[in-house]
Amino acid sequence: MKFGGTSVGTIERIKAVADQVKAVVDAGHQVAVVVSAMSGTTNQLVQWTREAGAMHDAREYDVVVSSGEQVTVGLLAIALQNIGVEARSWLGWQVAMHTDNIHGGARIESIDTEAMLARLEQGQVAVMAGFQGVAEDNRITTLGRGGSDTSAVALAAALGADRCDIYTDVDGVYTTDPRIVPKATKLDKITFEEMLELASNGAKVLQTRSVAMAMRHGVKLQVLSSFEDLPGTMVVNEDEIMEKNSVSGIAYSVDEAKVTLVGLDDKPGVAANVFSTLADNNVNVDMIVQTAASAPGKTDITFSVNGAELDRASTVLQGIKDELNYNDLLTSEDVCKVSVVGMAMRSQPGVARTMFSTLAEKGINIEVISTSEIKISVLIGREYTELAVRSLHTAFGLDSES
Amino acid sequence: MKFGGTSVGTIERIKAVADQVKAVVDAGHQVAVVVSAMSGTTNQLVQWTREAGAMHDAREYDVVVSSGEQVTVGLLAIALQNIGVEARSWLGWQVAMHTDNIHGGARIESIDTEAMLARLEQGQVAVMAGFQGVAEDNRITTLGRGGSDTSAVALAAALGADRCDIYTDVDGVYTTDPRIVPKATKLDKITFEEMLELASNGAKVLQTRSVAMAMRHGVKLQVLSSFEDLPGTMVVNEDEIMEKNSVSGIAYSVDEAKVTLVGLDDKPGVAANVFSTLADNNVNVDMIVQTAASAPGKTDITFSVNGAELDRASTVLQGIKDELNYNDLLTSEDVCKVSVVGMAMRSQPGVARTMFSTLAEKGINIEVISTSEIKISVLIGREYTELAVRSLHTAFGLDSES
C-alpha cells in the first residue's frame, strides 16, 4: 500500500491511513506500506536547500529532503500501534534500499528484504519511507520527485507482493483529466503499456518510472482513492483485458517547449550533429520534424523538449551556431502536447485520420507529430489544449453516458 | 562548535553560522560542528507524535524527532560549501554515534571517529547532527531534550578536540539570570563543579549531562554568543581560577513541586520505604526534610520532585497509603528552589548564615533545605523567587558596579 503526500498531509489523515491499513491487515494480509512526506513538506525543504546555497550539493540536498518521509513513517507507525496494529518504520538505509550514487535522482539497484520479510511473517506491518535509498558510501540518496511510487513498486517486486496498491487523491485512472473533461470515465483496467504512454505524456496519476518498473517485474498495480472506499483502476497485462476501445485514454502536457532551427544546411550529418550534441548535454528531445526551408539547399528542424530544459537547449545550440551554420534559433513555450493512447490502435487503422480530422475541424494547427505503436502525439498551440482534448475525447467515443 | 536551535532558526541564521565557522577554519583550525534542529521544529515534531497516538512508541518517536537535526546539518553543509568551505553532514548512524537502546533518552556508549578524523585532516568541516545516535539494532535513538550539548561534548572528547565552544543565544554564564537581576555579571571562568551545580539547579545555559561529561573527559568548554563576536565564559578546572568569591552564582528553578506526607509512623524503615518505592517508579526525589508531627509517635516528611513527576509521585504514594499508614498527602507546585553555588564555600564558612539571614530579613520562609559541598539550596514559596534571587545576589557581593 502506497500513500502520497495528500493522503498523509495531516495527523488526522495519517490516522485515517492507519485505519485503512488495519482493514487490510484484519482481512488476513501481510502489509508493507510506503509513504511520502506530508504534502508541502518536500517543497519547503527543497526551497530551503536553494536558499542555503546556490550550489546545493546534491548529496546534502538528499539529506535535507529525505527527512520529510522520515517524519511520516514514524507517525504512521505510531498511529498503527495506537489502534493495536504491530508496526515499525523502515528508512531507506535501514531496509536497505540500495541505489546508485546519482544524488537527487538515484536508481534502485537492489533491496534487502530478509529482515523485513521475517517481520512481515510475524504479522508486523512494515512502514517504509518512500523516495529514499542509500548509496554504497552510506550516504542517503533520493529517487527524484515522485519517487515514492517507484519505491513502492520496487518494494512490491522485491517482496514478491501479490499486489501494489497506490492510494492517491483520485480514485483511479480516467480516460482523460476530469478537470477539463467532466465526461471523462474511470477505467476498470488498463494495460501497462498504455499506462506508461499516458504517464510519460502528461497524465499525473502515476510516475512513469514506477509503471515501467511494474511492467518489467510483473507487479500488479492498482490505483485507488485514499479518501473513498471504492475499487480503483487495475494496471494489468494485455491478456487480462477482453475488449478494448481503439483509444483508451488521452493525455496532455503543457510542460513542453518548441525549438526551431531555421536554415540549416540540408546535408547528411546535420541532424545527427544537433541531436547528439543535445544528448551529450542531457537535453531530452521528444518530438522531431524536419521540413524543407524556403531557400534551396537549406532545411528547418523543429523539435520539442521539456520546458525545464529549454534554456539549456538554447545555450547548447547557440554554442555550436557557427558549426551548424543555421540562420535563426526560434523557441516557444506556448505549446501543448496532446496524445491519444490505445493498445487496439495497432490493429485498428484510422486512429490517426480521426485525430487529425477532428483537430482540423476545430481549426487547430498541428505543429509536430510523433507516433509509437500505441500512441499518437501532436504538438499544438497551448490555447487549444482544452478544446483539443474535449473534441478528441468525444471523437473516440470516450464520453461517459451520464 | 555547537549551535543551538535559535542559532540555526532561519536560513539567514544558518548562513551566519556558516560565516562563523569559516572564520575559525580560516584561522587554521580543524572544525567539527554540531547543530540542533531549527527552533520550534522539535516541539512541532513532538506534538505530532503525541497526536498520532497516545502510546507513541519511543523508537518511532526517535525516528520522527531526529529528522529536525537532519534538516539543519544538510542546510549548514550547503551554506558552508556555498562560501567555499568544504563540508559534509554526518547523521548519528553515519558517524556512528553508538548509544544504548533507551529510546528518547539514550546514553552515548562510543563514537567511531576514524572516518571523520580522516576528513577533518583533509580540511573538510564535519557537520554532525546533535541529539541523535544509533542503537545496536540499527534504530535511531535520541539523547533526550537538550541532548545536542551532550553530543557536542562527547564528540569533542572522542576527537580529542582542543576546545568545545557552545554557541547560544546568551553570551556566557552569568552570576544569575539577567532577566530577573539586571546587575548580574558575566563570568570569565567557572569551574566544572560549579557549572554542574548551576545547571542541575535551574540555570538553562548548559545541559547538566553535557557538563558532567565535559568534566569527566576534561573537555574545555566555552559558552559564547552566536550573535555577537565576544569572548564567552570558559568552564575550566579549579586550578585554572586564581581567586574566587565565596559564591559564584545563584540558580533558581520553578520547575519544582513539594510533597508532604503527614502523620507517618515515626519508626525505622518508613522513610526508606517511601523513597525506595518512589525510586522504583522512576520518581527522582531532590530535597528532603523530616519533621516531628504534632501527634506523638508520628512524623511528617516533606520532599521535592520535578514538577513533571508530581502526578506519578502522588499516584505511587496513594497506592501504598495503607502500607505507610499516613494521615494525609499534601502537594504543591507553588514553590521555587533557589541555590547558591561556589567552590570557595568549602573553605569559607558563613555562606549558610548569610543566605538564611538574608531570606529571613525579607520575610521569606524556608520550607526545605539541602546542601552539597559547594551548594546550598532552599525551597521557598514561588512568589518570592525574584525577591530571593535579587537579595542573595546583592548579599553575596555579585552585583555589577555599572
Image (cartoon, coloured by chain):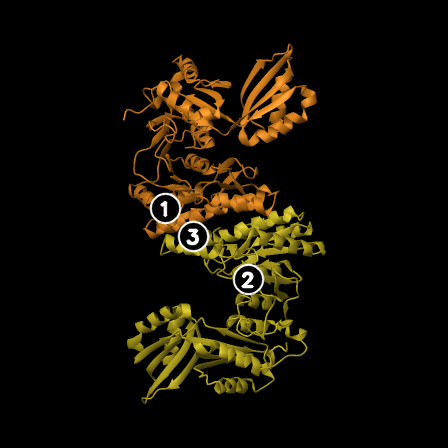
Chain colours: A orange, B yellow
Element type at mark 3: helix
From mark 1 to mark 3, how far is it between C-alphas?
18 Å
Height in image: A204 above or below B361?
Answer: above
Residue B163: image location, x then y, percent: 65, 63
Element type at mark 1: helix
Local crowd size for mark 1, using a 10 Å CA cut-off: few (<14), some (14–19), many (≥20): some
Nearest the eye: A347 or B358? B358
Query: Could you say which disc has been placed on residue A13 in the image?
Result: 1
Residue A191: image location, x then y, percent: 38, 25
Point out the residue furthest to the bottom here: B296
Amino acid carrying label 3: it is Glu
Q: Chain of mark 2?
A: B
Q: Chain of mark 3?
A: B
Observer-side mark, 2 or 1, equals: 1
Nearest the eye: A85 or A74? A74
Query: Could you say which disc has been placed on residue B60 in the image?
Result: 3
Tell me where residue B175 sits by quadrant. bottom right
Point out the residue furthest to the top here: A296
Amino acid carrying label 2: it is Thr
Locate the C terminus of chain A and report the quarter of the image it occupies: top left
From the image, tell me which residue sits under label 2: B150
Amino acid carrying label 1: it is Arg
- Note whether residue B356 is visible: yes
From mark 3 to mark 2, how far is it between C-alphas?
22 Å
| Same chain assignment for discs 1 and 3 | no
Height in image: A5 above or below A366?
Answer: below
Indicate left or right for B294 with A42 as reference: left
Query: Could you say which disc has been placed on residue A269 in the image?
Result: none
Element type at mark 2: helix
